[in-house]
Image (tube, coloured by chain):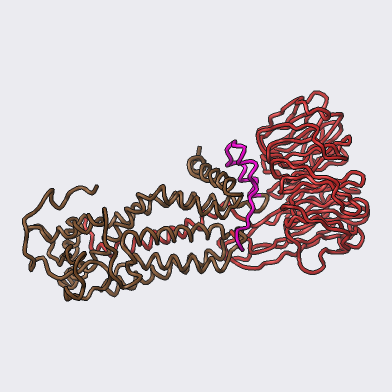
Amino acid sequence: MRIRNNTAVVVKVSLLVALLLVGLTVLGCYGTKTSPEGGSGGVVADGTLFLAPPIKQAGGFGCTAPSVDGKLVALSAADGTRFWEVPLEGSVSGGGFGCSQTSSPAAIYGSPAVAGELVYVGGYNGKIYAINASSGALRWVYPREGNLEPIIGGVIVALDRVYFGDANGMVYALDAATGDEQWKVILGGKIWATPAISGEMLYIGCFDKKLYAFNAVNGTKQWEYLAEGAIVSTPLVYNDTVYIGSFDRNFYALDAASGHLKWQFPAEKWFWTKAVAYNGTIYAGCFDGKVYALGAENGQELAALDLGSAIYSWPVLVDGRVIVSTEKGEIYAIDTASNQETLLTDIGEAVYAPLSAEGGVIYIYSQEQNLYALNADSGANLWNLTIK
Amino acid sequence: MGIGDIWNLIAMQPMINILIVLTSYLFNNFGVAIIVLTLVVNGMIFPLTIKQVRASKAMQDLQPKIAELQKKYGKDKEKIAREQMKLFKESGVSPAGCLLPMLVQMPIWIALFQSIMRVLAVIPENLVGLSGFLYSWPMVYTTLPLENHFLWLNLATGDIFLALLVGGTMWVQQKMVMSPTADPKQQSQSSVMLWMMPIMFAWLTMTFPSGLAIFWVTSNIFRIGLQYFVGGWGGLFKSESKKPVGRDKKYKERIAQVEELPSGGADIVVPSSTQEEGSSDEESGDKRPDSGGGYTKSLRATKRQPRKGRGHRRKRG
């Protein structure tokens, strides 16, 4: 091979390699974006379905400004007719390829909560919004100025208060009518979990591997339980027992009053979704693709139903059946009498958002931004819409 | 199984799980884990890296001779090319020696880079995605999600100080291996390389998570140390070259052997190994553009010596 000028060739090839390296570096970002998209599950109240679509980021390498504004949408639960939508503003604090968190999009992960005439929702942009459920008019926003750390878990409303946690590890209680702060408590790690409430006890999991119980009225800590892994799932309170799964791959049953361990059940992967309980049995979905049916009293494994792919979204109970969606979009109904699963339908799209149900209809919102209304008995598709 | 699956299986999964285990052992400090893993990976590919650095250094050492060839044959590019090839062959330097190890290392860097990005997992989508890469080691499951603060840094966001550090260390590294050349065209190409890469990476650092910048800075510092070990400060400071040792000495000797060829040697000026190690530039009467060896006489002017030992094409070992 004749090389006319070796040094020049080396320099040129080095230049090419350097450019290739930069290109691959940029491509290395592919699939690892840290820009949140969100996408909440739907919540049905008085015939209206409330949900927040995910924010789909603009493509390319930062040539276009990434989307940061989210929205809350109200639809007819009967046929999907859109009643209103409210824009939720995010903010941008820099450019770039979107691999770095340079913006605070108003991505909504937690499902909205409805109480009285208001619907509440918390965003990744660190804001809590209270919106009139009928008109979509904004009633209040917290904080009024500035932002909290990202809010990834959902909000719950009880005792005339709104409860939630943020990624700074702070648990907040706000006046549900005005948005005024009632109390706040700092925990030892980030909070991604939606809290749960029973009576005057508030339960919330944390990245610091602890499940906390607080007095929901004044924020006094009642007890804490240290697991071996982070807790991002929402506790289930059933028959004076708190049931919670952890990243340590264990599912725990704790005394609701004292936090003492009653039993624990080991699985193969993370627990992320909330469990449901029916007739003395706990149904807990796991990232190992199984739904474990466990005796509520002793944790005995009654069944391990392998559904094939990770279970991330919250299941719902409909007429004595547990409706579960896998990450791949296969919708199963588990008969609680026999603990046998039946495939209702396969929507073929990733499902992360919690399921919701009312009047024998299941509502499933996929990551492809499609909302499906399915007959809970047959799995028949009643209608579907793209909600962007 | 697609290419992506194979890549994940053989590169991403091991790297991700090792990174998580390291974090667990290093007091759950992800920043320290990135530094340690970067050093470990650098150690593992050390033979390739040192090969590349030595080849670059040898190429650097040949530059004055190449310049002299260019000066001697002017616009006769055919002749220059022929003589250069001869020179490379006789001195045991392969231009590909600089590039092949770099190309081999690239997949490893990409895997490490992608692993850091994935393990950071600062939003639910990332964490869900990460779960598919995990081995069933208990430690892996209990360590996640990782704390993304290190020193003053949020490892998930860009940082201007780290951007300057990445750019600065990259510039130093480039400058150390930069070959001096009399050719203005090559000079301008070298200059582009010297400034373009540091500026580009500094800008990238601003827009990428700083966990990645820690990886770049650690790698750069490692390479700077390695290059200093092999060839001193090179083009960074105009000072005496570091005395070559081990294999570098063999390179030097091989280059010096060209001088001793009876007839088949290149029609060029060659370094004197004795001057290289013993005498100063002033003594040789030649102004050297860098810290490499002294180049004083043309081959024709050199007293030819009979070939010694195994000859000039002995295997490198």
Apparent side of residue B185 relative to residue A349 in the rendered image (left or right): left
What residue appears at the point 77 percent right and 59 percent down from the top-left corner?
A71
Picture coordinates of residue A154, whole percent (x, y): 79, 51
Q: Which of B223 and A38 is in front in this view?
A: B223
Q: Nearer the viewer, residue B275 or B157?
A: B275
What residue appears at the point 82 percent right and 30 percent down from the top-left corner?
A296
User: Would you say residue A372 is visible in this rendering?
Assistant: no
Picture coordinates of residue A122, whole percent (x, y): 79, 57
Asked if residue B147 lies in the magenta stretch, the reply is: yes
User: Would you say residue A219 is visible in this rendering?
Assistant: yes
Q: Colour of chain A?
A: red
Q: Give the range drawn in magenta.
A: B125-152
Q: Tell me the quarter of the picture where residue A302 sits.
A: top right
Above or below residue A222? Residue B99 is below
Q: Colour of chain B?
A: brown
- For the N terminus of chain A, the quadrant is bottom left
| Outermost residue toward the front in this view | B278
Apparent side of residue B306 relative to residue A289 in the rendered image (left or right): left
Picture coordinates of residue A355, whole percent (x, y): 78, 42
Q: Nearer the viewer, residue A370 or A284?
A: A284
Asked if residue A226 lies in the magenta stretch, the reply is: no
Q: Tell me the quarter of the picture where residue A33 sits.
A: bottom right
What residue appears at the point 38 percent right and 70 percent down from the top-left corner?
B192
